[in-house]
Structures are given as structure tokens and as C-alpha cells.
Image: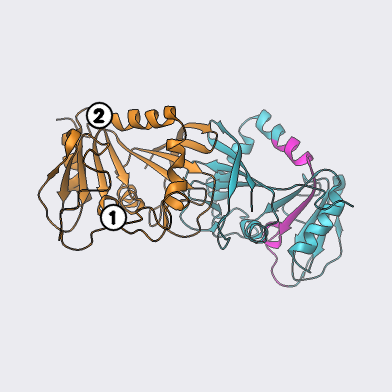
Chain colours: A cyan, B orange
Amino acid sequence: MTERPSKVICDLSVSVDGYAAGLDQTEQRPFGDDASDGWGGRLHAWMFETPERRQAELDRLATVGAFIMGRNMFGPVRGAWDRQWKGWWGDDPPYHTPVFVLTHHPRSPQPMDGGTTFHFVTDGIESALRQARAAAGDRYVSVHGGATTVNQYLAAGLIDELRLHIVPFTLGVGTRLFAGVPPLDLEQVESRAAESVTHVTYRVLR
Amino acid sequence: MTERPSKVICDLSVSVDGYAAGLDQTEQRPFGDDASDGWGGRLHAWMFETPERRQAELDRLATVGAFIMGRNMFGPVRGAWDRQWKGWWGDDPPYHTPVFVLTHHPRSPQPMDGGTTFHFVTDGIESALRQARAAAGDRYVSVHGGATTVNQYLAAGLIDELRLHIVPFTLGVGTRLFAGVPPLDLEQVESRAAESVTHVTYRVLR
């Protein structure tokens, strides 16, 4: 087995002031105060503006062989798993691959329709990455979010490519990308504009 | 006299994590630890990469009829003006117009070669803007920096257009653009990439 077989990428929508999430996530409102006008809707609206954009996002997900996400991105349940929460995405989540959920609370894998299986990893981010690499084959491993999880992987030097989608508003509070992450040298690999978002891809140099 | 005769712009180089300045400014090192490898050199290197880029920056400055800057951008002198500091830029600064320097300490205007005159404004940002508008004619007023001054003008709703130059590294500490500024709605007016920087122009909607 070669070292680092899969490239580790991270796609993240951020406000111009660098927030990847606002406040007030609840089960009814996973994206905060208001699903359409709130921070979640505003950060992610660019993905859904046209059928082409939506398809491009699905195509992008298909380049990924395994996802890693934090527990708060998976759901609103805190503490022990007192019920069978299966994510925000319904019976057939858009991942269609293994998804490794970071948690302190053990739980059996949760298979879903369409090839997605949620695996619950209790022994840390490096273990989750090892498992994700093994599952991803020659496709990407995506550190899918939220920002706290992304920051942990950035701080550990485990992300190869950071793809920011910079959305034209400022949020002022919430979870900031790069919070607690030591200074990074980046290489701008690509930068392109759409009408209401700027996409910038950075290679993380150290 | 029409209201708001001049458009108020702000050009600012920022790191990917939103810092417009690092730490450790001194008279010998106006851009912090090391002028070329330090944060100042890294934030502004894109302007000087090619003769074309340098010329484009000079052309941009020429669209401005009056500049506003904070005292710390003007120089390292703190407290009363105990000596005739004339800015970082030598006898012939690149502004060639009136420059309004915000300070708590009165001082007579300081004419320089080439048409630049430094005016010292002690009665606040709105007064400085009024004076800059009167001086700018039909050219732009530029809130030139540093980030603390920019943030004051943004918080007061006095900037029309924000032009960010996003440079591929993170700084982690320093003065952050948008610190203390209430949430802003922005309109992405232009976004374009150069090899080592992404330029994004936002209209400030409120």
C-alpha cells in the first residue's frame, strides 16, 4: 500500500469574513435561524441556483470515495446515541459511499439507501482518515465539515487541498474556518468567479 | 453640491483568513518582522510581481482624488507629534493628492513633493470623509487603511465598494478586516484571478 493513496480535499462555503457556520443550529433548523434567509441558506444557495450548478455539485460528490464529518454536521443529537438519528439527508443521502462520523460515543454502522453507510469513529481524526483512505480507493477523501472538524484536520496538516466558496456577505459570529489553526502557506491552484460566489482552490503547502 | 459626490472605495490586501495586518510594526519594520518575508511583504508582493502589475497599481491610485488613512498607517509616532514624521513614502509619496490622516493630535498640513499634502484630522471619520469628498472632485475617495480605520468606516456604513486582494496564506494573528463590523450584505461586482492572488470587488449593500 502506498503512503497517502488518496488526496484529502475539503470543500467549504464561507462568508467573506471567514465563517463556515453561524449560531443556533437545532434539529428543526439545521442551518440556524431560518433555513432560506439564515446563514445556512445564504452560504449554500449558490449550489442550487441553476440545474447546471446542482449537477456540478453532484458530479463533485461523485469524485469522492469517502467522507469524514463531525458529529454536529451529522445531526443535533449530543451525548450518547439515545435514538437512531440517521442524518439530515433522508433515506438516500447524496454521498453513496462510506461516511465516517467523528464522535465520542460508539455506535454500529448505519447503512442507508443508495450506498451510503455512516460509520462512527471514536478513536480520533487520524483513525477516521485511515479508514476513509482505505475505503476511498483511488478517489478523494473529503473532509466534509463542519468547520470545527475541518480546523482539526488543517491543524494536523492532513488536508491536501482546500476549496473555498466565498459568498458575498459577512456573518460576524459563528464558527470560523482557520480558528486555532497555525499559519499555513497555500498555493492558489485555481480561482474562478460565478455570479454570486468566488471559488478558490488552494494547495496546502505545510 | 450633490450628496455623496464621490464614490468611497477601499482596496485591501488580506490573507485567506482575513487579516490585513500582522503584529510588530516598528519604525524600522513598518510591515512587521521582516519586510520581505514578513506579513507585509507577503500581503503586498502581488503588486510588485511584474512591471505591468506595478503600473496597474499606479493607474489605480490615479483614479483616487483623496485618501484617508489611520495614523498608524501614516507612521509609528504615537501620542503628540514630537517630530516632523512625513510618512513612510519618502519626499514624493505615490498619492499626488490630499491625504487625510486621522489622529487625536492636531498638526499643520504637511505638503510633500508631487502634489501630496498630508492633512491631519482630529474631529473624526465623518469629518475626514467630508473633507476628502470636497477634495476628490469627481474622482474616488479611498479609505486607504489600515484595517482598523477601514473597519470604522465599514461599521459606519460609509464605504461603497470594497476591493479585496486575497493572498494565499493564513496569518492567524493581527488586525482582521470586519472585526467589530455588524453583518454586511455585499454584492459581488467582479472577481478575477491572477497567479498568486484573487481580486474580488464587492458593493456594500448596507
Viewer-nearest residue: A54 or A126: A126
Dot 1 amino acid type: Asn
Classify residue B202 by image quadrant. Answer: top left
Q: Which residues are magenta?
A: A57-79
Classify residue A114 by image quadrant. Answer: top right
Q: Which residue is mark 2?
A: B139
Q: Which residue is mark 1?
A: B72
Quadrant where the C terminus of chain B lies?
A: top left
Marks 2/1: CA distance? Answer: 25 Å
Where residue A7 appears, as percent x and y from the top left, is 76, 47
| Residue drawn 60% across the image and 33% down it | A49
In this rendering, the answer to whether B60 lies above or below A157 is above
Q: Is residue B173 left or right of residue A3?
A: left
Where residue A192 appears, as percent x and y from the top left, is 58, 32
Quadrant where the N terminus of chain B lies?
A: top left
Where residue A74 appears, as percent x and y from the top left, is 72, 57
Judge the density around disc 1: few (<14), some (14-19), many (≥20) Cα neighbours within 10 Å: some
Dot 2 amino acid type: Arg
Secondary structure under tag 2 reads: loop
Secondary structure under tag 1 reads: helix
Q: In the rendered structure, the residue with mark 1 lies on which chain?
A: B
Sequence-wise, the earlier of marks 2 and 1 is: 1
Give yes or no for residue A73 being in the magenta stretch.
yes
Q: In the rendered structure, the residue with mark 2 lies on which chain?
A: B
| Residue drawn 16% across the image and 40% down it | B112
Judge the density around disc 2: few (<14), some (14-19), many (≥20) Cα neighbours within 10 Å: some
- The residue mark sitting in front, 2 or 1, is 1
